[in-house]
Image (cartoon, rainbow, N blue to C red):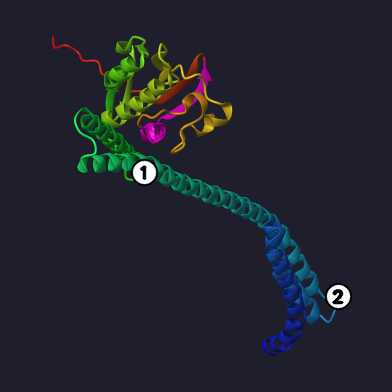
Amino acid sequence: MPAELLQAAPLALLFALPVAVVGGLLLHLMRRRSMTAAMVTLALVPLAAALGGVVGVSGLMYTPQLVGTIAVCAVVGLATVPVAWWLGSRFARDALWQREADAAELEAVRHAEAARRELVAWMSHDLRSPLAGIRGMTDALADGIVTGPEAAEYLARIRRESDRMAEMVEDLFQLSRATSAGLDLTLVPLALGEVVSDAVAAECTTAAAAGVAVVADHPEGWPVVSGSDSELTRAVRNLLTNAVRHTPAGGRIELAAGLRGGRAWLRIQDGCGGIPEADLDRVFAVGFRGERARTPGPGPGAGLGLAIARAFVEAHGGGITVRNHGPGCVFEIELPHVAPVRRVAPA
């Protein structure tokens, strides 16, 4: 029996090898076309090669061994082809999903790089202007070109420009913190009304000077949220600063809050005159300053306030949106709600 097997092996190899080669070529041709067809071909090639070898050994004659081999190959094929088809389809879907995910990640990286380049260009321009002014005024003071009341005015202008640059640097620092993967917030229950009251108190002088009224709708009854006091106050203050800056004199800013679907929301309605629909999706982009009614004047700001607000809100597990409504825009923050702790008085 072993001697017969040794004699049949070369003949079986002679018939099986061409089948295997053809199967390999098919797999090579389909490697970038249909993964499902490639998997099915991969399952059928060994069966076809084995069948070819048996046919060669039988001398192309009808024998019980040939019939048995054909039957076994048919049964195995019926079992393996559906499995190969399913695996191929699954692998194809996974590969397509991964390709789309890689493309989306690459596009996000490209957008981030473009935003970084634009930010560097904008900040370089915004810092160059006050630096040039400060240098010119200090040279004039040092050379004695200006004296008396005019010198005092120069010093005051130098102070204002210095404060403006300091705010830009602070915005850059806060943006770096807010977008850092290592940002670690200590979340505690915070009364949303108190957070807003702190932000309003910080902006009340600026709002009064601009002739803008800031009104909060019963903040003492607003919900409690899970947040970090300094970062959440910074986000709300940035939104309020933006609203004051773009609301004309005699305008009104209204703040309201409540619960919806188990989440707390805070709404800020300004009087900016609205944002062009094409720009609504770009409002929170780094460095975006808008157009028309939202074009900033000579005051401070590097176009980072809204980007910082969004980053801090999202770090709290919340979200922020904007839409045109009434005399201006509505910025709405959504945050995780925390049920207030009820203290039971001792008996």
Q: Residue 10 location, x and y as percent?
A: 73, 87
Marking on residue 128: 1
Q: Which of 62 and 82 is in front in this view?
A: 82
Q: In which quarter of the image is residue 56?
A: bottom right
Tell me which label, 1 or 2, sits earlier in the chain. Answer: 2
Marking on residue 62: 2
Examine the structure image and report whether residue 335 is included in the region drawn in magenta: no
Dot 1 falls on a residue whose secondary structure is helix
Amino acid identity at mark 2: Tyr
On screen, 244 above or below 116? Answer: above
**Is residue 11 shown to the viewer in this render?**
yes
Residue at left offset 49%, top offset 18%: 328
Examine the structure image and report whether residue 303 is included in the region drawn in magenta: yes
Residue at left offset 46%, top offset 16%: 271
**What range of the chain is rendered magenta?**
301-325
Between marks 1 and 2 in the image, the one whose residue lies nearer the viewer = 1
Q: Nearer the viewer, residue 101 or 204?
A: 204
Cα separation between marks 1 and 2 = 93 Å
On screen, 326 above or below 4? Answer: above
Q: Residue 346 location, x and y as percent?
A: 14, 12
Q: Residue furthest left?
A: 347
Q: Nearer the viewer, residue 227 or 142?
A: 142
Q: Which residue lies furthest to the right in this view?
A: 61
Amino acid identity at mark 1: Arg
Residue at left offset 40%, top offset 30%: 318
Viewport quadrant of the C terminus:
top left
Residue at left offset 51%, top offset 49%: 110
On screen, 184 above or below 149? Answer: below
The local crowd at label 2, few if under 14, some if 14 to 19, many if 20 or more residues have their Cα within 10 Å, is: few
